Image (cartoon, helix red, strand yellow):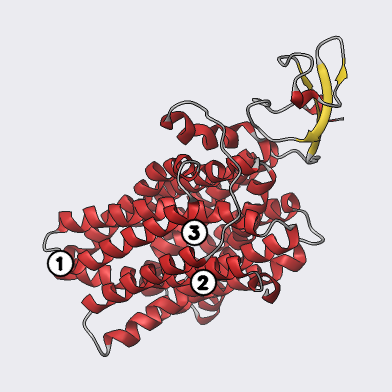
Amino acid sequence: MSTVLGNRTFRHLFLAQVVALVGTGLATVALSLLAYDLAGENASTVLGTALAIKIAAYVAIAPVAGALAGRIPRRVLMAAMDVTRAGVALALPLVTHVWQVYLMVFLLQAASAVFTPTFQATIPQVLPGEREYTRALSMSRLAYDLESLFSPLLAAALLTQVTYGWLFVGTTAGFLASASLVLSAVLPKPVPVEPTGDARARAVRGTRLLWATPRLRALLALDLAVAAAGAIVYVDTVVIVRDHFHQPAGAVSLALGAFGAGSMLTALALPRVLTTAGDRALMLAAGFALPAVLAAAAVLTATAASSWSWGALLAVWALVGAASSAVLTPGGRVVRRSAADADLPAAFAARFSLSHSCWLLTYPLAGWLAAGSGIPLTAAVLGAVALAAAIAATAAWPARDPARLDHLHTDLPAGHPHLAGAHPTADGWRHGHHYVIDRHHRTWPRPAASR
């Protein structure tokens, strides 16, 4: 990992991500306390609505990030989003009504929906080597996992000395520090984006790219499998721990910590594993592991609680974290392989939006089913969703999936620059190269064309 941190630009961007994540973690704790002050016993409803607004903002705003990244310098765009988030965080302690909380959450998450995919699209150009980029993805995954463990502890420590309103000040400081680090980084010159019509057309460009590329359709299916398994962890852990296993409140953190530990250990191991195992084999195996561990969760929560079943649940949660990390961490490699440099912002933005659409489905499913039908049935249904998603991913992702594909052009005139080295045939011009969906390649070639 130290080799990628030796790259000054990546080091500054990674530190910007870390301090912004810590700030976000502090804001999460402070927002919970603010909701309780405003709504009392209805605080859970407020937070549930805020979570839905967060995901909806991601889904709606992220595609716009791809269009903005092609028109605004990325460093300026990311710094502007950090400053926006800092301003919103500083204003949160001043709100006095629940609707104001919802508005602030939307603004905060809309800025994040622009910042995050732009950041993701920048890293493969900062670290073009496959090995270094894989390590960078693992470090990014670790940053998310460590934030989920470290930020609540930091917030708890700060709350022994100050009121929760000061946590928003810490959030503001984190975002401003992130903006400073982004501005201090020297980013590679972006590949020019060719005009493709109005802003709406540019915004949907990444979505069309994802749907037209088989391995990216498979990636979206695997994102659904992760969302199905993750939803029961994030939404139902407190009910499982407190009501089924009758454990104290502190055990909720232990269960979530097991999930995070599984994810972190996997992220640390992936750079070495991916040198021998391909993305497809590893990610599909992880995809099929998710319904298996959800089936185990259904069995554990359907049987009487005991010390061994409690320990088994912690192991199951760790396996969910491990399998999720094995899908999410290499996902950036798959996106990078499947898009031209100029289209990376649009591709990452589309994936960010569509993957969060999966959570928008599974979050309420996990909540409503658990409340109405119990945890065992919830785990079984979400396991069935994960299994269907893993099967769909396997069907969509060809077993033979080379980067270079031979294909036929029937719509380009002789002498076109793209046809350099192509061979004339009765139907058009045939050649082969690293194949991605772009203005010269609107559809994926049929398997017979990839000889």
How much space separates mark 3 and mark 2, taking CA atoms? Answer: 26 Å
Residue 4 image offset from top left, x and y in percent = 67, 69
Dividing the image into 4 quarters, which one contains the C terminus?
A: top right
Coordinates of residue 287 in the picture (x, y in percent): 64, 52
**Could you say which disc has been placed on residue 368 in the image?**
none
Three-letter amino acid code of the residue under disc 1: Leu
Residue at 46%, 35% (x, y): give it.
203
Discs 3/2, front: 2
Q: Quadrant of the N terminus?
A: bottom right
Circle 3 packing at 10 Å, graded few (<14), some (14-19), many (20+), is many
The quadrant holding residue 425 is: top right
Element assignment for label 3 = helix
Find residue 349 and report its horizontal and vertical position in percent. Answer: 50, 45
Q: Residues within 10 Å of mark 2 (few under 14, many from 20)?
A: some
Residue nearer the viewer, 79 or 314: 79
In this image, 246 relative to 9: left or right?
left
Query: Mark 3 sits on what residue?
Result: 230
In the picture of the structure, the residue carrying the numbered disc 2 is: 15
- How far apart marks 3 and 1 lie (CA) works out to 33 Å
Q: Residue at x 22, y 59 (%)?
A: 46
Residue at image position (49%, 78%) is 306
Crowd class of label 1 (few under 14; some 14 to 19; many from 20; radius 10 Å): few
* Residue receiving disc 1: 94
Could one spot residue 40 in this view of the protein? Answer: no
Percent x, y for residue 394?
A: 69, 42
Q: Earlier in the sequence, mark 2 or mark 1?
A: 2
The answer, for residue 329, to whether it is visible in the render is yes
Q: Is residue 422 above or below residue 348?
A: above
Q: Is residue 93 left or right of residue 302?
A: left
Q: From the viewer's perspective, is 294 left or right of 254? A: right
- Secondary element under disc 1, as helix, strand or loop, is helix
Q: Is residue 182 above or below residue 279?
A: below
